[in-house]
Amino acid sequence: MPFLLLLFSPLSLFILNSPIELERCIAIKEQKDFFLIRENLSGHYCQKKDINFSEELEPIGNFLEPFSGVYDGRGFKLKNAVIKTDNYEGAGIFAVSKGKILNVFVEKAVIKGNDLVGGLVGLNKGEIKNSLVFGSVEGLNGIGGIAGQNAGFIENSAFIGTVYGLVSVGGIAGQNFGFSDDYAVITKSS
């Protein structure tokens, strides 16, 4: 069942009228389903219930093979997401994304890495909309509550927790700029 607070927030408009509702999507109902996203980085996924992670996660995607699909959390929780990595390819539930991440609610996240570390995405080159992260994010450079670096769109999203870093640290994004012709926009977020 979706978190009831979301039913009375602006997020509910997107969760109840999600564009993914009209398309076929791959159901994510438990931890093992979530881990399979790595095998199809361009898939369309929709979360069907809360997921409580019982083991440490490996970030989804990387610089050479970013997540390029759609993940619609539909307001269900991803609970106890723990990621601790010492690589420099981004850290977050999604390490690198050029896809769409919608309606995701992360509770009790602990994300630790080096560069480009975010509570949801390490490097965002796609869209993040209507998402909420509670937790702590820690790293060295480019550290943010939602995205370590945003080179895409972040809209109507929020972070509540602590962010630690040495350089380029922010509540939503540690860095907000695109590469060459890319864009970087954050709107209606806190």
Image (cartoon, rainbow, N blue to C red):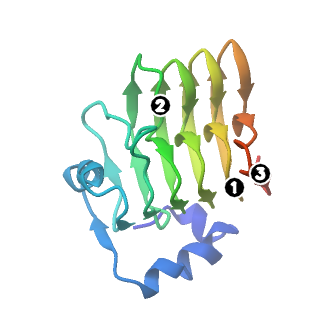
Labels 1 & 3 near each other (Cβ < 8 A): yes
Q: Which residue is mark 3?
A: 186
Q: Quadrant of residue 44?
A: bottom left
Of the numbered discs 1 and 2, the one sitting upstream in the chain is 2
Q: Position of residue 107 (x, y in %)?
A: 48, 43
Q: Residues within 10 Å of mark 2 (few under 14, many from 20)?
A: many
Q: Which residue is mark 2?
A: 91
Mark 1 vs mark 2, CA separation in Å: 18 Å
Q: Position of residue 96 (x, y in %)?
A: 49, 42
Q: Nearer the viewer, residue 131 or 97?
A: 97
Q: Nearer the viewer, residue 178 or 129?
A: 178
Classify mark 3: helix, strand or loop.
strand
Mark 2 vs mark 3, CA separation in Å: 20 Å
Q: What residue is shown at x 41% (from left), y 84% (from top)? A: 23
Q: Nearer the viewer, residue 89 or 105?
A: 89
Q: Quadrant of residue 2?
A: bottom left
